[in-house]
Image (tube, rainbow, N blue to C red):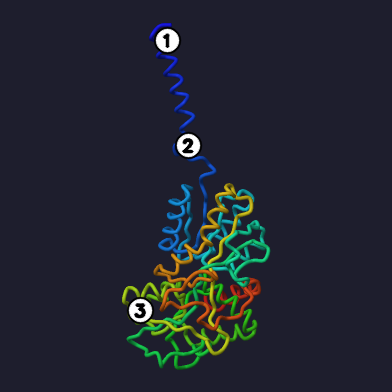
Amino acid sequence: MTALCLFSRVSRALFLFVLVLLPAAGHVSASDVVVVYTSVDQIFSEPVLKLFEQKTAIRVKAVYDVEAAKTVGLTNRLLAESKHPRADVFWNSEIVRTITLEKKNIFTPYFSPERRYIPEQFKDPNGYWTGFACRARVLIYNTNMLQKTDLPKTLRELTQPAWHGKVAMAYPLLGTAATHMGALYAVMGQENAESFLKDLKQNNVLIVGGNSIVRDVVSAGEVPLGITDTDDVHGAMLRNEPVAMIYPDQQSMGVFVIPNTVALVNGAPHPETGKQLIDFLLSKEVETLLMESTSQNMPVRSDTEKDAGRVSINDLNIMDVDYREAAAYVERSDKFCRALFVD
């Protein structure tokens, strides 16, 4: 055997050996990917998803929603793709649209082992979705314009003459504003809820394009008071803007809290990595991260330790609402609010 022939055989053997080793040396297959659609603000969701990548080596492809079309844009996309799903996981910043999609067979049940730490009120008994990390619908006020003693204690007080032209809220057709409307219908009853909305309109409520804009117009002093989410207020307070908040209806129907929800898409292209992502999102680690972030979400897990000084759902009188009933009212409330505030 010549030296050249021997070298050729050794080279081929070495080449084959390297080929065998390549998959173990970091090759990324289709099963090492997860696609998530999320309506959670990218500033909060992206760090969580990147941490998942670091811990698992699973590459995350994320599609984010925009403020002006919160949740609705991704809802419509999931419906349009229902016959050929592209997403594995839907991480929603609220709950009503999740329930609406569940009714349209967009999700498949998944009972994450992390569900055992989640209270019953925040999870679907059939495993279609699980809730975690709540926000609340609160009153934000400009501290240069109002003292705490001047503030209304209930949402209903916003319809009084003293607050004429002084209150802002987001279009009640999108995101958590729409979810809030469904909850008010469920708790107050359709007639009382629509009477409340008519009175707000009559009291010249300022309707703006999103919760963050409510925060901005109150911070700028365009109006002294608004209805928005806790994360928007926390962010402004951390920037030393002249705002603070109160939790309304503590002596009556309670403040409405909205959990994040996560669900596995029916027919997901990567169901196993989708389940891993869901387990991670429901973990104590992620609830703690969201609690300690600028959004300061309120954890719901029984084993998540609350930092001193932070508000917990256990510290509040929370609205006793059936989220499924709220979801059932959204179509009606959307139609009514569109006619009242838009058309």
Q: Secondary structure at mark 3?
A: helix
On the image, the x and y values in percent for residue 281 come to 51, 60
Look at discs 3 and 1 and give the one toward the viewer: 1
Residue 155, placed above or below residue 268: below
On the image, the x and y values in percent for residue 138 come to 47, 80
Q: Earlier in the sequence, mark 3 or mark 2?
A: 2
Type of the residue with mark 1: Cys
Which of the numbered marks, if any, corresponds to residue 219?
3
Q: Nearer the viewer, residue 184 or 21?
A: 21
Q: Which quadrant of the structure image shows residue 232?
A: bottom left
Residue 270, placed above or below residue 144: above
Which of the numbered marks, if any, corresponds to residue 5?
1
On the image, the x and y values in percent for residue 171 come to 50, 74
- Alpha carbons under labels 3 and 1: distance apart: 80 Å
Residue 320, placed above or below residue 301: below
- Alpha carbons under labels 3 and 2: distance apart: 54 Å
In the rendered structure, the answer to whether residue 118 lies left or right of residue 151 reads right
- Alpha carbons under labels 1 and 2: distance apart: 30 Å
Q: Secondary structure at mark 1?
A: helix
Q: Quadrant of the N terminus?
A: top left
Q: At x 58% / y 56%, what residue is drawn?
A: 78
Which of the numbered marks, if any, corresponds to residue 24?
2
